[in-house]
Amino acid sequence: MGSHGKGASRVDTVVTDVAAGHVAIGTRMPRRLRHARSIEDLRVLARRRLPRAVFEFFDGGAEDESTLRDNRAAFERWRLVPRMMVGVGTVDTATEIAGSRANWPIVIAPTGAPGFAWPRADIAIARAAATFGIPYTLSSSATCSLEDVAREAAGAPWFQPYILRDRPFFARLIDRAEVAGYQTLVLTVDMPTGGKRERDFRNDFGVPFHWTARNVCDFASRPAWAMQLIRNGVPRLENLIGLDRSGPDISGAASSVGRNYDPDFDWRGFEAIRKRWPRTLLVKGILHPDDAHRAVELGAQGIIVSNHGGRQLDGAIASLDALPAIVAAVGDRVPVIVDSGVRRGSDIVKARALGATAVMIGRATLYGAAAGGAAGAQRALEILTEEIVRTMRLCGMRSLDDLGRGWLVRQDAQPPGAAMAAGEGSEA
Ligand code: FNR
């Protein structure tokens, strides 16, 4: 598993195609996907195809979903200040992420149970990521085994284990990832217990899973989805087989209770994992700069600023709002990645301007995969990458390396030059 970099040539290809107004890749894409113009369009297609319980499992957040909403609002609070006449015929979107060259500042976030969106969606999304030259992160709650993904997905996927109560099982999982050739481990630390996702309870998609009149009717209301599921077999959480007596079935998908996660995990546990894993180690789920600092001191080689897409602690700070202080704390030593709420290319540009090395995206490609499998995941990445290029051009940015705070103002702040215009003297 080597680096992702096809570098500038791939970027040029995308830029040229975008400029010509064509879809960059994927000529055999079904019409309904080609006509999806935004991630929200893919979300609408996903909602139409999936049973309510499954759609809401992917789409929803914890409790009142205030953090879920605030993740989007945080991007809206920043406005771009474009510059003109820069010459943006060629823009450079390539970037280095945790030791690998990537064509875009995007990493696919780990998401559990993607097989309920589309059969073997894990591998479909991983392949789409490889096509775009970006890393894919496989969740330990995936519906394909980590060995299959390492073998069948091109590129160099990352692996994300949850910290499990069953420590020997957890240790074996990490060892399997090492043997399978994963170079990067993403340790998710924001799951001492599961968030309270009430939509899952209301839809009878909780733990333990029981068939009820409600979920039987719900699944039956989407016959195309149900037939596909029956033909391909009900997805299983392949990496967790043997973890508990109830088996790795659908009940593991709606992890509202989180009975398998270890609430006692602490910094000593982190040190032990650091000793055990010999390759790149990133920590996901950090929102406080002191935690970022401590993780880096103890050997983390990157920080992922995340509130889990609003699925864990409702009322938690928006990830984007937490980003600047964490960049200030550790950004000169390790890459800082941010996720939660990314739906537009301009969001990605804003995150870069606030100091992120890259963003992670979870639901964006999940909606795509739910709307149309591999082609849908690819369409999600086409949309986002096209929007990045368009945003950079409209802003007068030639390279992502040029980005900094000067490109942004807070929505409620005075724009550049406002003080001078108001006769309050020079800004010098
Ligand atoms: C997740 N997320 C997640 N995170 C993780 O570390 N391991 C996991 O297994 C999962 N599972 C999961 C399932 C689903 C359905 C979603 C939507 C999310 C969180 C994920 O990695 C990421 O932090 C968020 O998805 C980012 O927010 P957006 O991009 O979905 O808004």
Image: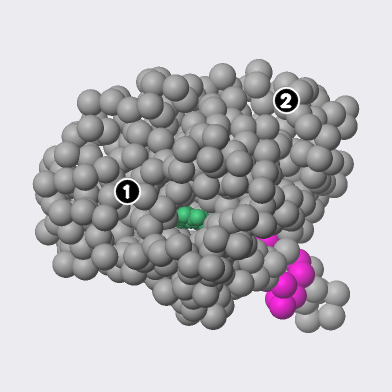
Quadrant position of the C terminus in the picture: bottom right
Residue 321 coordinates in the image, percent (x, y):
53, 68
Q: Which secondary structure, mark 2?
A: loop
Q: Is residue 146 left or right of residue 399?
A: left
Residue stretch rendered in magenta on the structure:
406-416
Determine whether 311 is above or below 357 in the image: below
The disc labelled 2 sits on which kind of residue?
Gly
Q: Earlier in the sequence, mark 1 or mark 2?
A: 2
Residue lying at 34% horizontally and 69% vertically, measured from the top left? 257
Query: Is residue 328 visible to us here?
Result: no
Q: Is residue 57 magenta?
A: no
Read off the residue under disc 2: 26
Residue 191 coordinates in the image, percent (x, y):
32, 63
The disc labelled 1 sits on which kind of residue?
Pro
Residue lying at 54% horizontally and 42% vertically, measured from the top left? 229
Q: Which secondary structure, mark 1?
A: loop
Query: Is residue 145 visible to us here?
Result: yes
Along the viewing direction, whichever of 294 and 382 lies nearer the viewer: 382
Quadrant position of the N terminus in the picture: top left
Q: Is residue 414 magenta?
A: yes
Of discs 1 and 2, which sits in the foreground? 1
Q: Identify the mark at residue 248; answer none if there is no mark.
A: 1
Residue 22 coordinates in the image, percent (x, y):
84, 29
Residue lying at 84% horizontally and 80% vertically, measured from the top left? 422
Residue 132, picture quadrant? top right
Along the viewing direction, whichever of 383 and 83 lies nearer the viewer: 383
Residue lying at 44% horizontally and 42% vertically, measured from the top left? 235
For label 1, the crowd category at 10 Å Cα-Cα, with few meaning under 14, some 14 to 19 and many 20 or more, is many
